[in-house]
Image: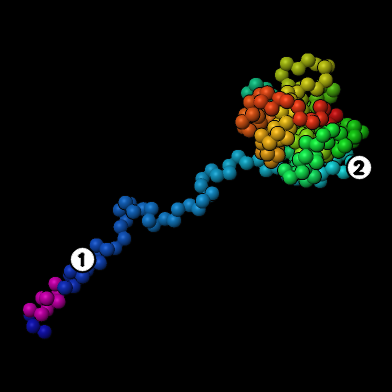
Amino acid sequence: MSTSRRLAAAAAIVVLWSGLTACGPSHSGSNKGADQAPPAAGNSAGAGQGAHQIPVGAGPQNSYNAATQPAPGSCHYRYTADKQPLPDLACTPGATSPAVTQANLKDTICKTGGYTSGIRPPVNVTGKEKAENAKSYGYTGPMGDAEYDHLISLQLGGDPNDPRNLWVEPPSPNHVPGKGPNNPKDSVETHLHTAICKGQTTLAAAQQAIATDWTTAEAKLGLGAGAASAPAAADPDDDAN
């Protein structure tokens, strides 16, 4: 090969190499996103955090037996900033009744004449459970002032006798000893029940809100205090005493 041809070939190789380098991937950081697939929709950081997992109970029974309660001292009350009591979510996450669904509200919790009186366990069962659950929570106050409460009340489709849905609710602040249970949670339950039956919120949303924190349930659902105050076929006394 002549000298001129060798020089031409060398020049062509240099040009080709320069072109390949210019077309190669950049790692300077300006195209960082091109090397990474975007996160799938719904999988962003924090999505779904804080969701309260509510189990499903057995539902209403023809007869009830006293349910086994958590071990003594294994449950611990929580309190809001203004000292309202909340249950231990490990012991009392709430439990829903499979007999109540969004599709059958008119035949269950919203039916005329009420619903809960026909499914509530008898006092001879709940009395035993209440005494044992007080030991679970270490409650030592007057039993007459504590409510054996359905965390998700019966009028909100809570399970009647699942131990995960029942707790000895101690008196709220400013309670007068010896006057019996008088907890503001009861009025929240009635407001949520009315909102469900009026179509202002869904059954699942109300159950989730009350089980997570009954003191903030109305605000989370966009229901101001008294916004759903008109009664809607609610059973007046929904505690398990």
Residue 202 image-quadrant placement: top right
Name the mark on residue 42: none
Quarter residue 117 falls in: top right
Q: Position of residue 183 (x, y in %)?
A: 75, 23
Which of pointers 2 and 1 lies earlier in the amino acid sequence?
A: 1
Residue 91 location (% of width, % of height): 74, 38
- Residue type marked 1: Ser
The secondary element bearing badge 1 is classed as helix
Dot 2 lies on which element? loop
Q: Residue at x 7, y 80 (%)?
A: 3
Q: Is residue 22 left or right of residue 102?
A: left
Residue farthest to the bottom, as pictured: 1
Q: Residue at x 78, y 21 (%)?
A: 182
The reply to whether residue 63 is in sight is yes
Q: On the image, which quarter does residue 221 sit in?
A: top right
The C terminus, quarter of image: top right
Other-residue count near label 1 (Cα within 10 Å), few / some / many at <14 / 14–19 / ≥20: few
Instruction: Provide the residue span drawn in magenta.
Output: 4-11
Residue that mark 1 sits on: 18
Q: Badge 2, how many Cα within 10 Å: few under 14, some, many 20+?
A: few
What amino acid type is highlighted by mark number 2? Ser
Instruction: Pinpoint residue 157: horizontal percent, then vertical percent.
Output: 76, 39
Query: Measuring 60% from the left and 39% from the top, which residue is drawn there?
Result: 50
CA–CA distance in space, label 2 to label 1: 86 Å
- Nearest the eye: 154 or 230: 230
> Which residue is at the front of the view, 238 or 7?
238
Relative to 64, residue 214 above or below: above
Q: Find out whether residue 96 is within the magenta segment.
A: no
Viewer can see residue 73: no
Residue 63: mark: 2
Please report the residue visible at 82 percent of the width from the left and 17 percent of the height from the top: 179
